[in-house]
Amino acid sequence: MEEKMKVMGVVGSGQMGSGIAQLGVMDGLDVWLVDTDPDALGPRNLLFVSIMSFGWLRLSPNLLVEILLSESLICIPQMAVGTDAPRRLRCTSNLKDLHSADIIVEAIVESEDVKKKLFSELDKITKASAILASNTSSISITRLASATSRPCQVIGMHFMNPPPLMKLVEVIRGADTSDETFRATKALAERFGKTVVCSQDYAGFIVNRILMPMINEAFFTLYTGVATKEDIDAGMKLGTNQPMGPLQLADFIGLDVCLSIMKVLHTGLGDSKYAPCPLLVQYVDAGRLGKKRGIGVFDYRRVPESVKPNARL
């Protein structure tokens, strides 16, 4: 299947969906980027594709973190277009435009019910040979596949954030995922220049099974007054050689996403050690979702860029 892949669909034009679309166009695929919100399909997505195609993959990790934590990306002039990548990207709000796609990668909200509804719709729209992949970071691929008539062609393809710059992709087989689907998906990820790790279909897979409890424990450390948020992040950055601390990382991921994954881990694995920290729950309830809202653990709204917490690494 992979050898014949020429058209990729991506559903969801947020940071993950846009990044996955960028990988496709940079590799020479024709890409349909779908979002139900037409405003989300504006010039910024096309600009981001242009930027990534223009050689930003060579950024150093420290500079990358600084840029991602700033608003710099949206300030780069559109004249930076240096390849024909933008011409291979087509944006639409109509799922039916995915009828010819060889693979569709879903990158929407981390909700099992919402994803199942989408997979059921895609199953009816897409051609019989199409692979339906989910970028879910924690939800059962087997359960998502149950919403379709083609469970053997449903697979997890979990990119890291941001997809064009992070080198890892987790590939997750559901109970009925075929060898052919697995090989085609793995080969496509490798074609994108990614290192592939393979996980069994258990809650959280590999990365988030380990990462999210660490972030949750950082919240407990703050919640119980062990240390300040600044010292928690500084301790983990300098003590474990991380590019950013766990609380800042949570802000970048989105506290709502972190909470959703912790709930999946808690329910799916049935162990109290995965219970979300009350402070994380409180922040999400208050709308403090992280950098995308301007405030999470840290406040990004009024602090000058040069003195934001941990902004310069």
Image (cartoon, rainbow, N blue to C red):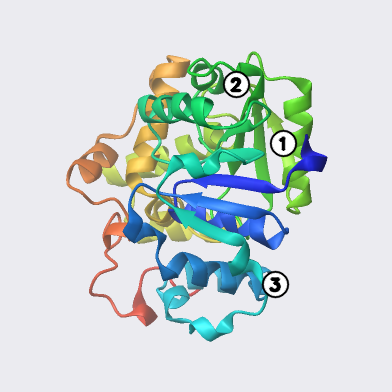
- The amino acid type, in three-letter code, at marker 2 is Asp
Residue hosting label 3: 58
Question: CA gap, disc 3 to disc 2?
Answer: 33 Å
Q: Is residue 287 left or right of residue 112?
A: left
For the residue pair 188 and 253, the one nearer the viewer reads as: 188
Residue hosting label 2: 201
- Graded by Cα atoms within 10 Å as few (under 14), some (14 to 19) or many (20 or more), the crowding at tag 1 reads many
User: Is residue 14 something one can see in this rendering?
Assistant: yes
User: Is residue 20 something one can see in this rendering?
Assistant: no
Looking at the image, tell me whether mark 3 or mark 2 is earlier in sequence order: 3
x and y, in percent, of residue 46 in the image: 50, 68
Give the residue at the far left of this rendering: 286
The circle drawn on residue 185 is: 1
Looking at the image, tell me whether mark 3 or mark 1 is earlier in sequence order: 3
x and y, in percent, of residue 99 in the image: 56, 38
Question: CA gap, disc 1 to disc 2?
Answer: 16 Å
Q: Are marks 3 and 1 in contact (CB under 8 Å)?
A: no
| SS class, disc 2 | loop
Looking at the image, tell me whether mark 1 or mark 2 is earlier in sequence order: 1
For the residue pair 71 and 81, the one nearer the viewer reads as: 81
Q: Would you place residue 148 above or below residue 44 in this image?
A: above
Image-quadrant location for residue 186: top right
- The amino acid type, in three-letter code, at marker 1 is Thr
Q: State how many labels appear.
A: 3
| SS class, disc 1 | helix
Image-quadrant location for residue 228: bottom left
Question: CA gap, disc 3 to disc 1?
Answer: 25 Å
Foreground mark, 3 or 1, reads 1
For the residue pair 9 and 128, the one nearer the viewer reads as: 128
